[in-house]
Image (cartoon, grey):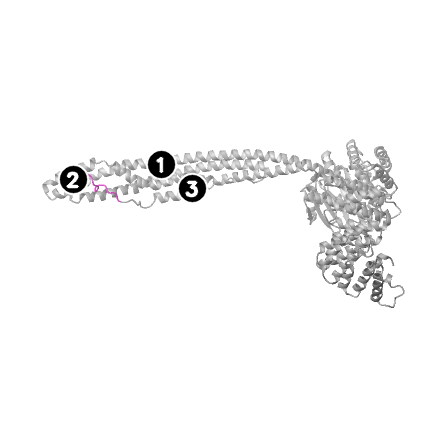
């Protein structure tokens, strides 16, 4: 046993026990101590050190401390450490800590032991942070010290200190290159303990593991990949790992199945349209370069196609050697067999994205692509001019008269046990219930496709689906008919008339079709052959027609047909003709290309739609701004109209009211003066003033009730009628204004209805003011306190009883009544009577504004809504211009994926130029 081990285990004393094994160490050391003292220069330090160990081992800690207190030689630091151990055992932890910290030594072993003791002490005292520092220092100082790293790992795990646990595992894995530590790290990764740590922290460990064991490297890398996939450090991981892999150059000696799968899944996740290209451009090139190097055999083609697709869409982004290798791998690979299914998934992804952006491709378009997945039926497109017997030919195949020359829609016939018919437009899919509905739907629109499933023996026997397109009568019909379904068809049969086969116009049509679908096999059917006089002429006609056709279409075949030929024999020959059209064809490969064509068409449409949407927003903003100007002008016109009607109607009413006022002010004094006739010499002059006052009030009341109000009633009714005419003129003008705006809007958006209930309110108020008895207060006309009235009344009372004075009083009263100034009385009565008419006049402006209130509300609300729409569209336009990549990038990535599928589905042959 080495000295250091003896000192660690406190067994140094055994060096003094040789030959005295059976004697107790205390006795042996005691005798040696006494003997040493006899020497001239005694050195008792070694014996005292050994005695301290024995006392310690026998739990006499105080005696041990006493022995170790004065050890000045090389054992001094160990003695100090042992004293600290003794204090530790006595539970005097503070003293122990002080002694441990005071030790000064060059021995790494002693330093390590001190750190481990402090580690235990701090745990016992609950000072976990200091315990962490102690054990970390011990590991750093002497990682090979027995159990030190295991102690550290156990402590970190026990206290869930995963940061230090991971750090320990990483450092030890790098230092020792031991798979056991890499396995510990692997377990931490799988437990999610490393997910928040920057990926570059693990690079050195991964490089070390790669050099040690490639299988374990792949396993740990895959675990980290899946861990980071769940958080924000995912892109950092991809960047770091791809950089790492580029530098270590993994070879083909190991099959990288896990990593290859992760590279594949990650690549397709990155280009699924949810990320912007600027966020991917720094990742993908290295990602693809690495993938193609480590791709498993099952991923060789897909990785190579991904490299080629990316290099085409983003030239110069990928290393030329990777592109060269990819080209070589694609040329040597077998064609990808799942291209149609994968392509359709991409198509669905594009359609879903388009719908999220509010761009609809149409039900008919999506249905056509889905129809391509049905490999049980060959799609034969029938085209030709309406007069060439095309409908008769189709009806012959169907076995009943379904199609006519007036058909506008295209019809797809498929065999089925039960009849089921749907009309498919860009907007919806509608079920068709009966033959009449079918014929009406077929004649309606060129943009309708009718899907007719029904029992048809010819279609069943030949595994055929028939696409009957409208007769081609010109360029417009051509573009809206057969042209739309060229890429849905597997073959085309162009119907010619035996009377004039392949006219220049027909040739032009067919050539244009071939230009639009170069891969579509085109064949010809010569109809109405029964019009040819004899069989020899018929044969010559077929040969001449075939020869002319083959000049332009070398592979085209010609079939002679007539509805008058023997039906079964002719159908049998036609079946053989159709089978010959399909001989040697690889339907799934062709359909795959068609699905990819429709994806390409969709992406192109959506890219163009982006420009169209921006232009549409600009046009909409401009149009709405013009509408705001028009609406504001309309509001101003309405305000002018309202003011004019207020002025006109109020003026008319004021004229009637003022005339009534003037009449009262003129008539009342006249009525009062005429009351003098009531005064006679027989009158009781003591009471005459009261009688006259009553009579005067009565005459005024009767005049107002019997003359003034009836006349006013007639006048105000006429005024209401005139006002109604004014209102109707206004409403007629507003109706024209509404029509003008609604024509501009293309919908019934503006309705400027005025409130004619105002007239009913006026009629009710007019009746209330002019019908029934007049409620006027009795006016004091002759009982007022004035000098003339006072003298007259007094004279009447004093002299009225004397007969000879009555004549004089009679004359005086008459003179007074006839000559009195009644203007003040007339003014007072008129003012009181006219109050209600003046109140009514004051409400006219409010009522007229109520009449126009709804048009104002409608126009103002429309202006407000238009302003809001302008701001929304401006914001949308700003966002669109500010971040065009939000719309453009997903489409570019869809195009990237499409191009990859094109490489994969044409592997092993020269791929066509990407159009």
Comparing 71 with 246, the one in front is 71
What is the quadrant of residue 646 in the picture?
top left
Mark 2 vs mark 3: give the one in front.
2
Quadrant of the snapshot with the N terminus: bottom right
Q: Secondary structure at mark 3?
A: helix
Q: Secondary structure at mark 2?
A: helix
What is the quadrant of residue 295 in the picture?
top right
Q: Is residue 333 visible?
A: yes
What residue would you read off at disc 2? 791
Comes first in the chain, label 2 or label 3: 3
Comparing 97 with 17, the one in front is 17
Residue 798 pos. (x, y %) = 12, 43
What residue would you read off at disc 1? 656
Residue farthest along the front direction in this orientation:
40
Mark 2 vs mark 1: give the one in front.
2
Residue 665 pos. (x, y %) = 28, 36
Comparing 45 with 513, the one in front is 45
Which span of residues is magenta-colored? 778-795
Q: Any mark on residue 55, and which?
A: none
What residue would you read off at disc 3? 759
């Amino acid at each position: 046993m080495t000295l250091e081990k003896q000192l660690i285990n406190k067994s140094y004393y055994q060096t003094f026990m040789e030959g005295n094994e059976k004697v107790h160490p205390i006795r042996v050391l005691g005798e040696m101590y006494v003997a040493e003292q006899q020497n001239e220069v005694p050195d008792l330090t070694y014996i005292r050190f050994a005695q301290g160990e024995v006392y310690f081992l026998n739990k006499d800690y105080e005696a041990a401390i006493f022995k170790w207190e004065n050890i000045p030689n090389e054992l001094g630091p160990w003695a100090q450490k042992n004293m600290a151990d003794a204090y530790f055992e006595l539970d005097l932890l503070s003293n122990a800590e002080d002694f441990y910290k005071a030790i000064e030594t060059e021995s790494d072993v002693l330093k390590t032991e001190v750190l481990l003791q402090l580690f235990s002490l701090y745990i016992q005292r609950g000072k976990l942070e200091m315990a962490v520092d102690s054990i970390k220092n011990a590991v750093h100082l002497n990682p090979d010290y027995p159990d030190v790293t295991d102690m550290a790992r156990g402590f970190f795990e026990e206290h869930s200190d995963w940061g230090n646990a991971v750090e320990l595992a990483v450092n030890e894995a790098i230092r020792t290159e031991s798979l056991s530590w890499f396995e510990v790290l692997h377990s931490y990764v799988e437990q999610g303990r490393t997910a928040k740590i920057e990926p570059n922290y693990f690079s050195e460990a991964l490089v070390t593991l790669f050099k040690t064991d490639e299988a374990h490297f792949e396993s740990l890398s895959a675990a980290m990949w899946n861990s980071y996939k769940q958080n924000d450090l995912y892109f950092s991981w991809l960047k770091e790992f791809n950089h790492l892999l580029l530098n270590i150059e993994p070879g083909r000696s190991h099959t990288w199945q896990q990593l290859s799968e992760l590279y594949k899944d990650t690549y397709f996740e990155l280009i699924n349209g949810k990320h912007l290209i600027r966020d991917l451009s720094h990742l993908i090139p290295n990602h693809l370069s690495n993938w193609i190097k480590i791709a498993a055999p099952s991923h060789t083609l897909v990785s190579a196609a991904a490299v080629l697709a990316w290099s085409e869409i983003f030239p110069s982004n990928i290393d030329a050697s990777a592109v060269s290798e990819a080209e070589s791998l694609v040329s040597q690979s077998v064609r990808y067999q799942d291209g149609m299914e994968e392509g359709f998934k991409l198509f669905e992804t594009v359609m879903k994205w388009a719908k999220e952006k509010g761009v609809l491709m149409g039900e008919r378009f999506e249905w056509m692509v889905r129809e391509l997945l049905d490999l049980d039926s060959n799609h034969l497109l029938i085209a030709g001019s309406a007069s060439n017997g095309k409908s008769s030919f189709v009806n012959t195949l169907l076995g009943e008269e379904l199609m006519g020359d007036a058909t506008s829609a295209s019809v797809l016939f498929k065999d089925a046990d039960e009849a089921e018919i749907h009309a498919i437009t860009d907007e919806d899919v509608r079920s068709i219930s009966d033959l009449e509905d079918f014929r009406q739907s077929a004649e309606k629109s060129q943009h309708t496709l009718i899907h007719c499933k029904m029992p048809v023996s010819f279609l069943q026997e030949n595994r055929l689906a028939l696409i009957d397109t409208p007769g081609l009568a010109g360029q417009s019909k051509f573009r809206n008919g057969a042209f739309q379904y060229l890429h849905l068809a597997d073959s085309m049969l162009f119907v010619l008339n035996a009377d004039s086969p392949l006219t220049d116009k027909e040739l032009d049509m067919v050539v244009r079709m071939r230009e639009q679908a170069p891969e579509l096999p085109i064949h010809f059917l010569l109809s109405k052959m029964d019009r040819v006089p004899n069989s020899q002429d018929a044969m010559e006609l077929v040969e001449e027609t075939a020869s002319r056709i083959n000049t332009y279409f070398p592979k085209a075949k010609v079939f002679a047909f007539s509805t008058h030929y023997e039906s079964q024999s002719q159908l049998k020959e036609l079946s053989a003709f159709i089978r010959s059209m399909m001989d040697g064809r690889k339907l799934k490969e062709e359909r795959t290309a068609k699905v990819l064509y429709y994806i390409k068409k969709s992406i192109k449409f959506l890219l163009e739609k982006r420009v169209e949407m921006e232009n549409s927003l600009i046009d909409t903003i401009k149009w709405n701004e013009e509408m705001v100007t028009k609406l504001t002008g309309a509001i101003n016109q309405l305000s002018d109209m309202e003011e004019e009607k207020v002025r006109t109607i109020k003026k008319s009413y004021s004229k009637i009211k003022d005339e009534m006022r003037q009449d009262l002010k003129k008539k009342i004094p006249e009525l009062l003066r005429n009351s003098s006739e009531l005064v006679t010499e027989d009158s009781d002059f003591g009471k005459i003033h009261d009688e006259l006052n009553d009579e005067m009030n009565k005459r005024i009341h009767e005049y107002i009730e019997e003359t003034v109000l009836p006349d006013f009633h007639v006048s105000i009714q006429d005024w209401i009628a005139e006002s109604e005419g004014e209102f109707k003129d206004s409403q007629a003008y507003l109706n024209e204004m509404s029509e003008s705006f609604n024509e501009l809007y293309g919908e019934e958006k503006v309705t400027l209805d005025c409130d004619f209930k105002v007239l009913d309110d006026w009629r009710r108020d007019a009746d209330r003011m002019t019908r029934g008895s007049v409620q006027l207060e009795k006016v004091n006309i002759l009982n007022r306190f004035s000098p003339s009235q006072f003298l007259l009344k007094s004279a009447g009372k004093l002299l009225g009883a004397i007969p000879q004075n009555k004549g004089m009083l009679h004359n005086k009263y008459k003179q007074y009544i006839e000559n009195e100034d009644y203007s003040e009385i007339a003014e007072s009565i008129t003012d009181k009577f006219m109050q209600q008419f003046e109140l009514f006049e004051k409400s006219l402006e409010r009522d007229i504004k109520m009449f126009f209130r709804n048009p104002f509300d409608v126009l103002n609300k429309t202006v407000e809504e238009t302003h809001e729409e302008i701001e929304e569209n401006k914001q949308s336009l700003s966002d669109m211009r500010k971040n065009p990549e939000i719309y453009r990038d997903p489409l570019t990535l869809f195009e990237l994926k499409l191009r990859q599928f094109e490489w994969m589905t044409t592997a092993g042959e020269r791929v066509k130029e990407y159009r």
